[in-house]
Image: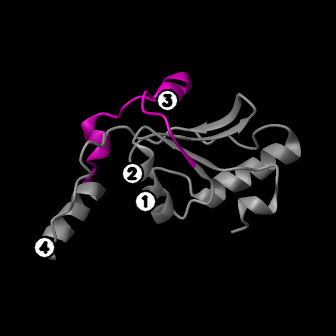
Amino acid sequence: MQNAHDDPRIGLLLIGFSPADRLDPIARRLGWTGAVLSDPDRELYRRLGIGRAPWWRVYTPATLAIYVRARRAGRRPSRPTGEDTRQLGADAIMVGATVLTLWRPRSPDDRPSAADVLDEGRRALATGGPASDPA
C-alpha cells in the first residue's frame, strides 16, 4: 500500500467521540498513519448523518462467534468501558468541507480498508470527484 504521505494532497484523519487517549491505541492497532482527533459531542457524526446501529447489526453471528472462540480458549473478551459499541462511525473522502464519498458501515466488520480509502482519494483527486459509489 502506498503511504498517504507519498502524496502531500492527501491527509488521513481518524475522528472519534472517545477521549484522545483512548483513540490513540485504536489508531495504532489499525495501522493508521494520519492525525487522530476527538469529537466528544459527535458534531461531525450528526453533520454526516451517522447514527447508532441497532444491536442486531453490531452483535452479528460473526461477532458472537469471536466471543465464543475466545471463551473456549479460556479468554474473556474485554469490553471497553464507557465506549458506545453501537456507534459504527464512517469513512469519508472530503475536499475542503465537501464530502465526495461516504461509507456508512452496516456492521463492525463492514469497513473499507485504509488502502481502499486512499485509492478512492487518489481517484477523486485525479478526476475531481468520486470514482465509485461505495453504497
Q: Which residue is mark 3?
A: 45
Kindly identify the amino acid type of the residue bearing the numbered disc 3: Tyr
Q: CA distance from mark 1 to mark 4?
A: 27 Å
- Which residue is denoted by mark 2 in the rendering? 22
Q: CA distance from mark 3 to mark 1?
A: 21 Å
Q: Along the line of sight, which residue is nearer the eye, 7 or 24?
A: 24
**Residue appearing at x 75%, y 39% in the figure:** 130
Q: Range of the magenta residues?
A: 36-61
Cβ atoms under marks 2 and 1 closer than 8 Å: yes
What residue is pinned by disc 1? 25
The disc, 3 or 1, on the residue closer to the chain's N-terminal end is 1
Mark 3 or mark 4: name the one nearer the start of the chain. 3
The image shows residue 8 at horizontal and vertical percentages of: 82, 54
Circle 1/circle 4 CB separation < 8 Å? no
- CB under 8 Å between discs 3 and 1: no
Distance from the alpha carbon under mark 2 to that under mark 1: 6 Å
Marks 2 and 4 in Cβ contact (< 8 Å): no
Camera-side mark, 3 or 1: 1
Q: Earlier in the sequence, mark 3 or mark 2?
A: 2
